[in-house]
Image (cartoon, grey):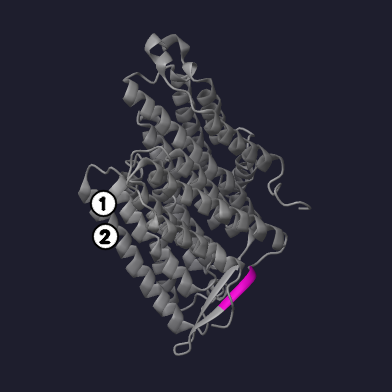
Amino acid sequence: MVNILSLLSTVIIVPFVGMIFALMAKDDDETSRYNVFNVGIFTVIVNLVLIWRVFWIVNVSQPGLQLIEKFNWLETPNIDIIFGIDVFSLLLIGAVHLAFLIVMVGVRNSPFHPKSMMVFALMFLGSITGFFIAADIFSFYIFFEAMLLPLYMLIGKFGDIKKPQSLYRFFLYNLLGAVIMFVAVVMIFDFQSGMELSRVRALPMQTPVQYFIWGAVFVSFLFRIPVWPFHYWISVIGSGVKNPLVFLVVNLLPLTGVYGFVRFLPQTLPDGAAYYILALEIISVVTMLFIALIAFINKDFQYKMFAYLTVYYIMYLLGVLSRTELILFNIGFSFFSFLIIVAMLEVVSQYIHFQQENLDIGCEGLLCATPRLSFIYSFFILAAVGLPLSSLFMNNFLLLADLLAFNLRMGLVVVFSLILLAGTLLGTLYRLKDRSKFCADQTCAQDISTPVFAFGLFVVFVLLMSFIRPLWFVVGV
């Protein structure tokens, strides 16, 4: 080891330390159950403070990785572990942690077994944080695959998947992507001296071996993005999970695929590769339209949320394929609001579903009896459909303008898919606020508590400030 423990290493390690404390906690009574959740929430808050500190240290106007930490792991073969951060990956890490904080607060009173759920959730959080910080191909691959273990455990134990064979096929599906990625990593290590991701992106693409390497890397990333024909098992699992924490973890998987394209997409593409990129773009927009149409006619809110996530992930993938640095920067700010909105909508929708099941009442007009819940739910629905309530509005506006300028037909399909999604979410909001169908039984619905409402207002404040000034929490930026 050349370096001592530094700030980026600490950000990776903190969730694993929290996982150890969660393992040691007892969960045999009500107090111990809450202690386990408190450990998870405290761990996320500690890391958020560290991430805030990193924002203060980095130069947000400087491109490239900063705060480089290098550890010599092996001499023969020579393998160095390198960590680094830029504004894009730092925004993703902050958004993921805020989303985890939201869903942990949301499931704090859930009947699920808290100890196992919190242990695997923190394991996943540490792995995805390491994935975003990894600056060499070896640690990038390790964290890329390390996320799968807690993912499978959370789905299998808390996902409430009614068809176990779907989980087995999902496992084999991602295992195949892992094998393909491993082959590509080995070939890259043999092909060049050094393992830095920045050098991998600059590799020339001239020989058949390099075409095979890039093809294997891109296919392994596509295995995590719900793009046809790689979408089926992701959609089966992603739309069937009811637990908000597990739903978030499952639907963060496509984010890792999009981020993989950001880090690996070559700076210059040969003429032959341009046709494959065009084919991927065509397949992507068709998948967007297909999923948006299904969501428009589907009554299940979980599928609507899955469709919303999928369409936006594919839109961001199209933005990444444009290889424009300004667009990539805007996508980072969009992700910051996007993940927070999704986490809050999932928690609130599950609370509404819980009210319906326990009170045996319909959803029409339910929000009329719960003013605090109505405000929070309405705000996040309106933010989700693109109203100027968060940084999602401005940055998506710039992304859509770029897509329309690049290819008018493709851009119009993307816009139409987003309009369908907006109609789907607004239709759900209308039914929940339809006073004409409000009945006396719905008056017994319980509104959210004052502390939860205050937490929701805090999240509202964060989103509004992200629209006014994206890096409002860093003075002088």
Span colored in magenta: 66-70
Q: Residues within 10 Å of mark 1 (few under 14, many from 20)?
A: many
Which residue type carries mark 1?
Answer: Leu
Residue 398 position, x and y percent, is: 64, 45
- Write down the quadrant of residue 202 in the picture: bottom right
Which residue type carries mark 2?
Answer: Leu
SS category of the residue bearing label 1: helix
Q: Is residue 357 above or below residue 411?
A: above
Assess whether residue 69 is covered by the magenta stretch.
Answer: yes
Q: Is residue 342 above or below residue 442?
A: below
Q: Nearer the viewer, residue 209 or 342?
A: 342
**Label 1, on which residue?**
167
Q: Is residue 449 above or below residue 406?
A: above
Q: Nearer the viewer, residue 64 or 3?
A: 3
Residue 106 position, x and y percent, is: 45, 38
Residue displayed at 43% across by 40% down: 108
Q: Which residue, as the protein is rendered here, is positioned at the far right? A: 476
Residue displayed at 20% across by 50% down: 165
Majority SS type along the magenta span: strand
Pick whichever of labels 2 and 1 is earlier in the sequence.
1
| Labelled disc at residue 172 | 2
Residue 121 position, x and y percent, is: 41, 53
Whole-angstrom CA distance, mark 2 to mark 1, is 9 Å
